Structure formats: C-alpha cells, structure tokens
Image (tube, rainbow, N blue to C red):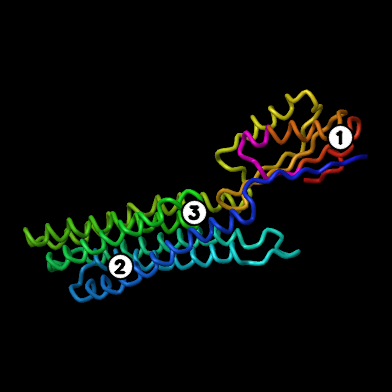
C-alpha cells in the first residue's frame, strides 16, 4: 500500500519570529505603563475607601499579570526550542495564558461583587475629586495601551486576552469618572458601589468568551472559521479523489491552523496532492498533511483506524 505525505506551509519561521518580535515591545511598554498606574490607583482607593477605585485597581492588577504572562508566552513561542518531545515548541503557551487571564478576571469580578454586597446599608463617603483625577489618568493610560496592542490582538490569543483586560479597564475608568462626578456634585456615595458592580458585570461575559475560545483550541476543536463539512465535500468533489476519510482540523494557537486527511485515489499522487492543497488553502489551511491511499486499499485503512 503506497502513501504520500504533503506539507503545505504558510509563513516561514523567519516571518513568525519577526511577528513575535513586533508584538513583544508593545507588550513590554504596556507592562510598564499599567504596572505603574496600578500602584497609584490601589493606594488612592485604599486611602479614600473607594470600592470603584479598588475594583479598577484589581482589574489593573490582572492586566499586569495578563501582560506579563502574554509577554512570556510570546518569548517562549519565539525562543522556545522545538524538540522531539515538544515538536510544536511552546506555541500553546499563549492559549494557557488566555485561560489564566479569564480566570483572573472572573475572580476579581467575584471579589468586587462580594465587597459591594458587604457595603449595602452603609453610607460610603468618597471624595469625588480624587476619583475624577485618578480616573482621567487611568483612562489616558488605558487608551495608550489599547492602541499599542490593538494591531496584534487579532493575531495572538495571548495579546487578545491582555487587550480585552485593558479594554475592560478603560470602561472601568469611565465608570469611576462618572462615580466621581456624581459624588462630587451630589455627595451620593453609593454611585461608587454601583459603578464597581457594573464594572464586574461588564467584565464577566468577556472573560467567559475568552476562556471559551482558549478551551476550544485546547480541546482541539475545528476553528470556528473553517467549515469542515464544506471542506470534506470540496475534497470529495475533486476529479482525482474517490474517497475522503480521517479528516481532522484543529488550531495549535491563534493563526496556526492544522489539518490531516486521507484521500483514496487511483490517480498519480502529484495530481491528488496539488488539487487537495488548493482546496485546503481556500479554507486557510496552509499547514496540512495529506495521505494518499491507492484505490482498493482505503477501506482497509479505514477499518484499521481506532479513533
């Protein structure tokens, strides 16, 4: 029984390394900016007993952790050695980072909600001007960091996790600003608690979406943008293909989709591979392993497969 394997590649290793380098310096600068402001906001929140500031500082802390983990993931993906044991290198580090980021966000949101309930029945006194000044500074820093990360947020799930956290903080800063204006003009301290709760509730669904995307990759499900049924049909429609089986499509990490497939055919392998590669490329699958089984042998091949 004859077999033929074809690997169709997208970007080269040099291209991937260049992309990684381009993503690293914005992440490093973002860590410095967010980390510095986290200290300022936490100290201010504790000093004036503002739950909104403390909540926003908690999100800032998750930003710092997310950015550091994302930076480490990018460095591992770029410099981590590919060995016989780790044949894909460290690219999955980005996915684990995204899961950790989502759990951090959910944890902070739960803490804020708990604190908000604990403050019911009290009459919180919050200096509005302090909230306004800190919120304006935080909003400016968040916008800068978002601009730094936006371009790479679609290409890396680790960067996307950090970007979503910074986006949540930008919304949080707007909320703190509103709470400060209300407290300053009306003296109503509960605006601080309400804003903290709204920040927490706004963050949770986004954290769950990030976790879902990461777990989809870890579970080796087909990428959402790849219609596997249509892919199988297009491969089967090729004149040189008699049978399509054992088709698997999954993602190693964001932007790195992989496929394997067995094709039964009585035609020359070169023709089968050329046609299959074109179909796979139309679905964004540039890294694929194709095995061609001679006609008459593919059924026996299928029967021998156990999963």
Label 3 and label 1: CA atoms lie apart by: 39 Å
> Counting residues from the N terminus, which is met first, the one under dot 1 or under dot 2?
2
Quadrant in which residue 130 is drawn: bottom left
Disc 1 element: helix
Check whether the beta carbons of the residues at disc 3 and disc 1 lie within 8 A of each other: no
Whether 295 is drawn above or below 252: the answer is above
Check whether the beta carbons of the residues at disc 1 and disc 2 lie within 8 A of each other: no
- The circle drawn on residue 214 is none
Residue at the outermost right position: 1
Label 1 and label 2: CA atoms lie apart by: 60 Å
> Counting residues from the N terminus, which is met first, the one under dot 3 or under dot 1?
3
Please give left or right for residue 126 compared with residue 91 in the image.
left
Q: Could you tell me residue 7's position as x and y percent? A: 74, 45
Q: Could you tell me residue 211's position as x and y percent? A: 49, 54
Task: State which region is magenta.
Answer: 279-289
Crowd band around label 1 with a 10 angstrom C-alpha radius: few (<14), some (14–19), many (20+)? many
Please give left or right for residue 121 compared with residue 149 in the image.
left
| 212 or 96: nearer the viewer | 96
- The circle drawn on residue 298 is 1
Circle 3 sits on which residue? 211
Residue at point 48%, 59% (across, down): 23
Q: Could you tell me residue 54's position as x and y percent? A: 27, 68
* Magenta residue check for 170: no
Residue at point 68%, 32% (across, down): 279
Circle 2 sits on which residue? 57
Count of numbered badges drawn on the protein:
3
Crowd band around label 3 with a 10 angstrom C-alpha radius: few (<14), some (14–19), many (20+)? many
Q: Could you tell me residue 202's position as x and y percent? A: 33, 52
């Amino acid at each position: 029984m004859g077999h033929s394997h074809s690997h169709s590649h997208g970007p080269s290793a040099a291209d991937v390394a260049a992309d990684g380098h381009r993503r690293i310096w914005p992440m490093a600068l973002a860590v410095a900016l967010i980390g510095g402001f986290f200290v300022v906001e936490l100290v201010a929140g504790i000093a004036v007993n503002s739950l909104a500031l403390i909540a926003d500082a908690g999100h800032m802390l998750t930003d710092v952790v997310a950015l550091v983990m994302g930076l480490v993931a990018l460095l591992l993906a770029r410099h981590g050695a590919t060995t016989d044991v780790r044949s894909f290198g460290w690219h999955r580090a980005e996915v684990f980072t995204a899961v950790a980021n989502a759990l951090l966000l959910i944890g902070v949101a739960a803490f804020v909600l708990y604190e908000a309930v604990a403050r019911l029945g009290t009459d919180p006194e919050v200096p509005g001007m302090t909230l306004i000044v800190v919120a304006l500074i935080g909003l400016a820093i968040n916008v800068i960091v978002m601009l730094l990360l936006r371009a790479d947020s679609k290409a890396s799930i680790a960067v996307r996790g950090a970007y979503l956290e910074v986006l949540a903080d930008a919304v949080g800063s707007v909320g703190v600003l509103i709470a400060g204006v209300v407290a300053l003009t009306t003296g109503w301290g509960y605006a601080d608690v309400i804003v903290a709760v709204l920040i927490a509730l706004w963050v949770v669904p986004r954290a769950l979406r990030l976790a879902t995307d990461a777990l989809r990759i870890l579970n080796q499900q087909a990428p959402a943008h790849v219609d596997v049924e249509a892919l199988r049909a297009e491969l089967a429609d090729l004149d040189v293909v008699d049978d399509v089986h054992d088709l698997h499509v999954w993602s190693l990490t964001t932007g790195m989709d992989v496929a394997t497939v067995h094709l039964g055919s009585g035609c020359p392998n070169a023709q089968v591979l050329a046609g299959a590669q074109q179909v796979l490329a139309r679905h964004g699958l540039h890294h694929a392993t194709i095995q061609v089984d001679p006609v008459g042998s593919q059924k026996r091949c299928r029967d021998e497969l156990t999963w």
